[in-house]
Amino acid sequence: MTRRILTIETSCDETAAAVISDRLEVLGATVATQHELHERFRGVVPEIASRAHVERIMPVIDECLRQAGIMLADIDAVAVANTPGLAGSLLVGLSAAKALCVALDVPLLAVNHLQAHIYACQVNSPENVFPCVGLIVSGGHTSLYRSDDPLDFTLLGATIDDAAGEAFDKVASMLGLGYPGSPAIEHAAHGGDRTAYRLPRAMLDASEGLDFSFSGLKTAVRYKIAPPGNVDFDQLSLTPKVVDDLAASFQEAVVDVLARKATRALRETKLSTLCVGGGVAANGALRERLVADANANGFTIHIAPPELCTDNAVMGAIAIERLRAGLTEPLDLDIIPGPARR
Ligand code: KG4
Ligand code: ZN
């Protein structure tokens, strides 16, 4: 008999739920973003995020059940992202999931948000994507994992400072492209010259392993915009050409580092499949470069579809693997907010 799980995702600023069958059919999926609440702060404010999750979690679940054409009583298990993420945000999802498990007398399943970003590739693929190297490029994380199967992930490397998405957001803000500004960087980059500015590509030496660093790149862009010192970016008038060229040069630097490190991870692990997920994987230039490198080096690549790159609950389908393996959780399951950058 088909089992249906409800997945809940509230790790950062998206409130999301999905209903998924144990054959990985997506029966309903809802995402409520909070961009308008954080826009004037140009970044996610944790307290605002958690309060918004409280208001949205039940309407989001209701909408998702409506799409699936089922009632709560038809759910066979509830899965929730409990790590990593913002503490207050994770707590809202976990509390809702536990309450539903008690009320419905169904098992609770834990989802690791980063592993779920990789699993978004499996949801979208008719073939088994494991074993693979997983590249996660999001607002809080830039990490490479080795995954021999969906229950087994080993960290190979991660950013030692800013995540790639964080650098995109901060550079977009400096260039006056709004919040969240990474799609605007991608748009501006189309009209720009990616060789116009020489920007650093950190930690590419083989001795520096598979870790990343993006804060120096972000600072380099800042110094191209204006000399060091107290600069009010809102008062700067950058020409459209400077904005486009800086956007293109910055994007190229990020893409170059991510692609080279991913190829190195495949070579070092001797694996032949790369799975890519996380919000930055929605970036067209990154997708094109990764596919080109995969073709040139003869490895298989799966990139999550753009709508499953940014945070969503469909990727929580990874919990089905735990359900199949009997790995359900006790009701005193806790959140694990950190480590922040892994
Ligand atoms: O995975 P995600 O939704 O949330 C986290 O888990 O952090 O990723 C959000 C990040 C943001 O930093 C955002 O700037 C970035 O994904 N992002 C993009 C694009 N769309 C979203 N970065 C580059 N190009 C894009 N088109
Ligand atoms: Zn994410």
Image (spheres, rainbow, N blue to C red):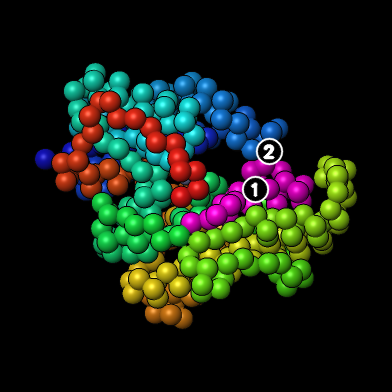
Of the numbered discs in the image, which one, if any, rests on residue 42? 2
Secondary structure beneath disc 2? loop
Q: Residue at x 25, y 58 (%)?
A: 149
What is the residue that sits farthest to the left in this orientation?
A: 1
Asked if the magenta segment contains residue 109, the reply would be: no
Query: Is the distance from the Cβ of mark 2 to the nearest ligand 1 atom less than 8 Å?
Result: no
Of the numbered discs in the image, which one, if any, rests on residue 169? 1
The amino acid type of the residue labelled 1 equals Asp
- Report x, y in % for residue 218: 69, 55
Residue 289 appears in view? no
> Is there a contact, CB below 8 Å, between mark 1 and mark 2?
yes
> Is 158 rendered above or below residue 17?
below
Quarter of the view holding residue 327: top left
Q: Nearer the viewer, residue 31 or 210?
A: 210
Q: Quadrant of the N terminus?
A: top left
The residues colored magenta run 158-182
Q: Would you say 299 lies left or right of 141 here?
A: left
Kindly report the distance in space between the C-alpha atoms of the residues bearing marks 1 and 2. Answer: 8 Å
**Marked residue nearer the N-terminal end (1 or 2):** 2
Residue 139 appears in view? yes
Asked if the magenta segment contains residue 160, the reply would be: yes
Q: Nearer the viewer, residue 325 or 30?
A: 325
The amino acid type of the residue labelled 2 equals Arg
